[in-house]
Amino acid sequence: MIQVVEVPNVSWEDIGGLENVKRELQETVQYPVEHPEKFEKFGMSPSKGVLFYGPPGCGKTLLAKAIANECQANFISIKGPELLTMWFGESEANVREIFDKARGSAPCVLFFDELDSIATQRGSSSGDAGGAADRVLNQLLTEMDGMSAKKTVFIIGATNRPDIIDPALLRPGRLDQLIYIPLPDEDSRHQIFKAALRKSPIAKDVDIRALAKYTQGFSGADITEICQRACKYAIRENIEK
């Protein structure tokens, strides 16, 4: 498997709203990296991982990239289904390889997207050839438990289906913090519009607050797509003038 290891160029400014989530991530991920002596002083072991859950398109991947950037940590992103192969033993080897790479790139944020595809409750995968998903999950748990405190590797999982995640993955020392990433409220939508359009010239009669009001139920990804499409139409008009 080939994974790109990089420090992302996504910052908090690229993410509108979600202030409470940002604060929680700073306390859970950034503080242990930047102030390890404080945790030692108070005899506290920093968390090793969190699980983002909530509707699709609400910024889970962006948040993971932004916190890695804030810590100046490397970032490795894996989609759950990429780990699964038809060959016996290869899926577990993929998991070992990813964790080895993360340890070698520390400080590192390891992001598992679509975690529910590899971390469903064991024994529930009907028609699963030889229990491949169960073996991958067992390997994942083994790697998490074997993480040395000296290696700063933080694990973030993301799912739209927290109800089917195996409870063993959510025990203390694993993904023990659950963070809900909701659909944005009106203030958050306003911030998302501002973030998405901050590099674009905007006409004086564009009321971003009104746009935020009219887009109730839209995800962050939906709003970003609206802004991208508006820019595309503006470019077309500009060229055809």
Image: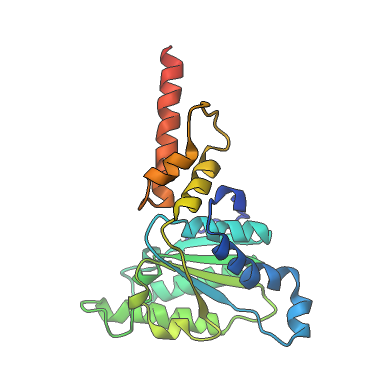
When the figure is inspected, residue 30 is found, relative to residue 237, above or below; the finding is below
Which of these two is toward me, 145 or 190?
A: 190
Q: Residue at position x 55%, y 85% from top?
A: 145
Find the residue positioned furthest to the top: 241
The x and y percentages for residue 191 are 53, 48
Q: Which residue corresponds to the image point at 55% horizontal and 67% vertical from the top-left?
A: 110
Horizontal and vertical percent position of residue 192: 50, 47
Q: Is residue 149 above or below residue 100?
A: below
Residue 182 percent across, percent down from the top left: 43, 62
Using the image, determine if residue 38 lies above or below residue 9.
below
Query: How far from the left and from the top, in percent, is residue 63?
Result: 54, 59
Residue occupying image coordinates x 54% and y 51%: 15
From the viewer's perspective, is residue 52 above or below residue 210? below
Residue 11 visible in rendering: no
- Quadrant showing the C terminus: top left
- Side (left or right) of 164 relative to 223: left
* Side (left or right) of 130 relative to 202: left
195 on left or right of 40? left
Which of the pair 217/140 is nearer the observer? Answer: 217
The quadrant holding residue 155 is bottom right
Compared across the picture, whether 235 is left or right of 107 comes to: left
Taking depth in this image into account, of 37 and 202 the one nearest to the observer is 202
Residue 17 visible in the current orientation: yes
Residue at 50% x, 60% y is: 77
Q: Residue at the left extreme?
A: 127
Of residues 187 and 100, the one drawn nearer to the viewer in this rendering? 187
